[in-house]
Amino acid sequence: MTQSPIHDPQSKMIRVLIVDDSSFMRKSLTYLLESDRSIEVAGTASDGVEAIQKVKELRPDVVLLDIEMPRMDGLMALMYIMNECPTPVLMLSALNKRNPTIVIKSLEYGAVDFIAKPSGVISYDIDKISNEILTKVKMAADIDVYKLKLSLPEESFQKERAKSVNPKEMVVIGGSTGGPRAIVSLLSGLPHNIPTAILVVQHLRPEFVPSLVDRLRWACPLEISIAQEGDVINSGQVSIAPGYHTTIVREGNIRRIHLATEAPHNFITPSINDAMESVAETYGKGGLGVLLTGMGDDGAHGMKAIKDAGGSTIAEDQSTCIVFGMPRAAIEMGCVDVVVPLPRIAQTILRMI
């Protein structure tokens, strides 16, 4: 996997506001962030009310925001920040382990990403995830905050549609940073009688997947479920990778879901490449790959495999990507048929199938 986008050291310092009710966490995060010479801590806050005030006063480039705090929690503060003074926000919390729905909610409310504290509310071992924090802070600093608004389809396709004369059999969709909201937007534009099966592979820990599925069921007219080992693939059905590597295997004329806990090709879970490569192998020209926003290059080789097998490919345009890493890698590999903004992807899928 290629390196994540790194902030240009020649550019101005990245100013970060740390929001956490623990003085230990504020001090530890300050030390961790300022160990990188391209980052400075612009200030700290101990609750959501103070965070809103400090964002307005200090105008930081990035906010590291805890969730469980007195007076006003981080989720409420996030809503105020994105409404009154839009700023890239990274949620850094342990609350997700008790209430995983918070992750999906924070991403919908405009957070760039969610970082789990390694060992609870006060994580004395926060240095274990120092690389993740530094990488994501630099990534967040380069984001156009107005891209964090949910992009809805330009036209609703939630209506009956005639079946295509040359249908695809499987659409496989990959996403990472910014992916959950992009997936909600994309699937909400598709009709319930779409004549293909759909597999969604989002970089997400297993405990957060049920919350994403609940959100998708509320927003979309499609039949949506978490992929299970041995599930038979049927048209009109959307399977969401359960946080483990999810591929398609063929048994005669039947295709099934196969799950694996190990990472065969890389350390990203679940692997978009592995899922797309399995679609290329089992569906050939009947496969359609869609690559959405995300860091790194997972999915690029999978898109190439689909293209080489005679299938079709779509990549999200830079204009709507929270992070343009994965689509850029596939485009540079020369294996993308169409590059379109997020609101037009549903329409493009329907045209291709």
Image (cartoon, grey):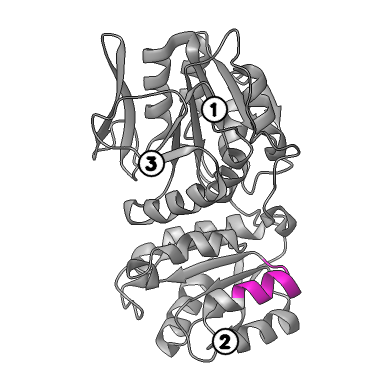
- In this view of the protein, which residue sits in the foreground, 31 or 224? 224
Q: Is residue 212 above or below residue 331?
A: below
Find the distance from the CA under tag 3 to the CA under tag 2.
40 Å
Secondary structure state at the residue bearing disc 1 = loop
Find the distance from the CA under tag 2 to the CA under tag 1.
50 Å
Q: Is residue 193 above or below residue 337?
A: below
Marks 2, 1: nearer the viewer:
1
Q: Hey, what amino acid is under mark 1?
A: Asn
Question: Which of the marked residues, 3 or 2, is nearer the chain's N terminus?
Answer: 2
Marks 3, 2: nearer the viewer:
3
Residue 39 at x, y = what percent?
A: 60, 68
Q: Which mark is residue 45?
A: 2
**Which residue lies most toward the front here?**
160
Q: Hey, what amino acid is under mark 2?
A: Ala
* Range of magenta residues: 78-87
Residue 97 at x, y = what percent?
A: 33, 67
Disc 3 target residue: 225
Q: Is residue 157 magenta?
A: no
In the picture, which quadrant includes the C terminus? Answer: top right
Q: Is the magenta stretch mostly helix, strand or loop?
A: helix
Q: Residue 35 carries which label?
A: none
Question: Which of the marked residues, 2 or 1, is nearer the chain's N terminus?
Answer: 2
Marks 3, 1: nearer the viewer:
1
Q: Hey, what amino acid is under mark 3?
A: Ser
Does 298 sit left or right of 40 as displayed? left
- In this view of the protein, which residue sits in the foreground, 211 or 95? 211
Does 144 sit left or right of 187 as displayed? right
Residue visible at 72% across and 64% down?
Answer: 12
Whether label 3 touches label 2, CB < 8 Å: no
Secondary structure state at the residue bearing disc 3 = strand
- In this view of the protein, which residue sits in the foreground, 90 or 109? 109
